Amino acid sequence: MKMANFTLHHLLPCLLFFAAPLVAFPASTPDDFLQCLSLHSGNAFAISKLVYTPMNSSYSSVLDITIQNLRFLTPFAPKPIYIVTPLNVSHVQAAILCSRRYGLQMRTRSGGHDYEGLSYLSEVPFVILDMVNFRLISVDAEDKTAWVQSGATAGELYYRIAEKSKTLGFPAGLCPTVGVGGHFSGGGYGTLLRKYGLAADNVIDAQLVDAQGRLLDRESMGEDLFWAIRGGGGGSFGVVVSWKVKVVPVPSIVTVFTILRTLEQNATKLVHQWQLVANKLPNDLLIRLILQSNNSGPNGTRTMQASFNTLYLGGVDSLLEVTRSSFPELNVTRQDCTEMSWIESAVYFAGFPKGTPLEILLNRSSNTKTFFKNKSDYVREPIPESGLEGMWERFFEEDEGVAQMIWNPYGGKMAEIPESAIPFPHRAGVLYKIQHITAWTTGGNEVAPKHVSWIRSFYSYMAQYVSKLPREAYINYRDLDIGMNNVIGSTSYKQASVWGKKYFKKNFDRLVRVKTVVDPENFFRHEQSIPPFSS
Ligand SMILES: Cc1cc2nc3c(=O)[nH]c(=O)nc-3n(C[C@H](O)[C@H](O)[C@H](O)COP(=O)(O)OP(=O)(O)OC[C@H]3O[C@@H](n4cnc5c(N)ncnc54)[C@H](O)[C@@H]3O)c2cc1C
Ligand SMILES: *[C@@H]1O[C@H](CO)[C@@H](O)[C@H](O)[C@H]1NC(C)=O
Ligand SMILES: *[C@@H]1O[C@H](CO)[C@@H](O)[C@H](O)[C@H]1NC(C)=O
Ligand SMILES: *[C@@H]1O[C@H](CO)[C@@H](O)[C@H](O)[C@H]1NC(C)=O
Ligand SMILES: *[C@@H]1O[C@H](CO)[C@@H](O)[C@H](O)[C@H]1NC(C)=O
Ligand SMILES: *[C@@H]1O[C@H](CO)[C@@H](O)[C@H](O)[C@H]1NC(C)=O
Ligand SMILES: *[C@@H]1O[C@H](CO)[C@@H](O)[C@H](O)[C@H]1NC(C)=O
Ligand SMILES: *[C@@H]1O[C@H](CO)[C@@H](O)[C@H](O)[C@H]1NC(C)=O
Ligand SMILES: *[C@@H]1O[C@H](CO)[C@@H](O)[C@H](O)[C@H]1NC(C)=O
């Protein structure tokens, strides 16, 4: 592997406080940063054509295009001084070097799906390194591996794999527009999780540029850092340029169904029963649950609607045998089921109607952007029916269709992987994960306080039913409510460990040790990045 051929200027040791300049060269004029980039980006493509400032007419469209959460798509949100869209590794290296030199914070963005917008927002002067041009995907169907650059989306990866073979797939997110840069960094789950685990469980090599600007691979970064980047969360250890993954076998025919049941159709009992069976089903069967309120009850009254959203890795005949023996209460019938290829199921789970061309998976703006606030929980004991009824009552206090929960069953492969194998620790003993959602399209940011306060109060109600000490949470569902966040420029292990233990349990301490070795000056940082031990 080719290594960086420049060295960083000596850095001052005091880096704990941002107000003290990182280095001796404050950004006096914008040109200094740009000149620095040109100077350090080697003979590659002229970097000035890849840098946007607010003076460039396309600055806003480049900034806004991948912002997923409309809450942060406002003129009042903090804006970057520069957006750098590298084409070559040398551009990534130059962006790191020059951001350090001029005391600018750098935020790396791949797909822009961070729930709290940490890949494109900062309270201090900052640069966005946008990996949008790093999109190459090369699939080796024979070897069952692929290299995928970090700016590619999960949908692009699925599509390129399917181009090579209809019996290969990859266990990453249901939403095709998530960027693999952030998504794999935090774990990454989708319809294949009970069979093959997370995306990060299937990463076998990576290229990363570290805070010194060195280009590293698995061998040169060593097993500790390679461990940390597979689930320790994006934006803490370096810039991932590309991942090498194992692609996995899928049958040529899979079966899907989505069965809706309301309270009048015994949804409460079915949801309760689901908790007892969903994590014990064969690994080939994933039944997710989507819960929301609906005004379709008797005489237009409020009811709850439970959607049993399912992928089976096999044909309809064997699916019906499995559901009859393991979840007869759901009464799955042949008419509920549709057979298709795995790649078609990726389109189905992304929410597109049957017959939508597969090319929709290549469309980076295909999902509907909304205003939202999501949170997560892990459930280790079934919630009693009375607890479910309490949840429905609270749903009825929120506007119709705004609140949602998505329950994803674990078990299978997820329970077999040890908690310390990668930083993602939610394994054996987890029945399912809850994603709490409040998402609205009308009323804009004006109504945000109302919806955000609803979800916070719902989350408090749920405390009695979910994992405790720590109350576990999924790093890819980033939530700035769950502990005191890093004050940019100062770091406290003790403060960070509150959210750190929720996301990573005991793995948090190892992440801090790795960070202390590879980025002791805390160049890669954000409100919930892994802090180094401070001296
Ligand atoms: C609509 C929607 C659907 C989703 N569906 C799923 C799902 O099905 N399954 C699931 O597991 N998750 C899902 N997520 C969550 C998603 O996995 C995380 O938000 C993930 O971090 C997104 O990665 P990204 O590259 O798109 O985000 P970004 O916002 O670009 O990045 C997220 C974080 O990673 C850092 N980062 C980005 N690129 C790099 C890089 N190249 N190197 C190092 N750090 C980097 C960023 O700085 C930031 O801290 C969904 C999110 C949304 C908004
Ligand atoms: C830089 O990237 C471009 C586009 O990917 C490629 O054509 C070119 O060869 C690269 N140059 C170097 C020096 O790597
Ligand atoms: C932005 O504007 C500057 C100054 O006109 C120009 O040099 C640069 O190439 C522009 N950037 C892009 C990406 O077009
Ligand atoms: C709901 O459950 C009751 C009692 O178990 C049963 O009699 C009834 O048929 C069920 N209703 C539906 C729609 O399945
Ligand atoms: C509400 O229920 C009706 C009838 O089952 C259904 O057609 C509609 O799609 C549901 N609304 C939502 C928001 O899911
Ligand atoms: C629905 O409304 C009709 C007419 O008002 C009434 O007769 C009926 O009892 C109502 N049904 C229920 C389930 O409330
Ligand atoms: C199962 O579903 C079928 C078709 O919808 C229906 O006819 C039958 O009554 C249901 N059986 C039970 C036990 O609910
Ligand atoms: C991508 O999807 C969006 C929303 O569905 C659509 O408006 C747009 O035309 C699509 N773009 C392409 C290139 O297909
Ligand atoms: C989180 O909220 C978004 C915004 O509406 C919603 O579309 C999505 O369902 C949630 N995320 C995931 C992964 O489902």
Image (spheres, grey):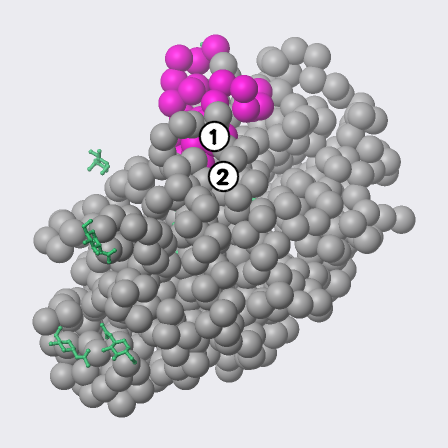
Side of 248 relative to 109 (left or right): left
Whether residue 344 appears in this view of the structure is yes
Please give the residue where the numbered disc 2 appears in the rendered image.
451
**Residue 98: x, y in percent?**
64, 28
Amino acid under disc 1: Val
Is 532 situated left or right of 164 in this image? right
Helix, strand or loop at label 1? It is helix
| Residue 67 shown left or right of residue 140 in the figure | right
Residue 148 position (above or below residue 88): below
Image location (x, y in percent) of residue 425 = 60, 69
Left or right of 336 on screen, residue 300: right
Front residue of 105/140: it is 105
In reply to whether residue 69 is colored magenta, the answer given is yes
The residue sitting at 61% across, 54% down in the picture is 460
Residue 362's tag is none
Q: Is 79 inside the magenta-drawn segment? A: yes
Q: Position of residue 235 (x, y in %)?
A: 60, 45
Q: Which residue sits at x=65%, y=11%?
A: 29
Work out which residue is located at the far right of the displayed protein and give it.
Answer: 535
Q: Secondary structure at mark 2?
A: helix
The residue that mark 1 highlights is 447
What's the magenta region?
A: 55-81
Which of these two is toward me, 339 or 214?
339
The amino acid on which the numbered mark 2 sits, given as a three-letter code, is His
* Residue 245 visible in the snapshot: no
- Pointers 2 and 1 in contact (CB under 8 A)? yes
Where 137 falls versus 268 (above or below)? above
Main secondary structure found in the magenta portion: loop
Is 379 placed above or below 331 here? above
Q: Residue at x 75, y 37 (%)?
A: 487
Q: Quadrant of residue 87?
A: top left
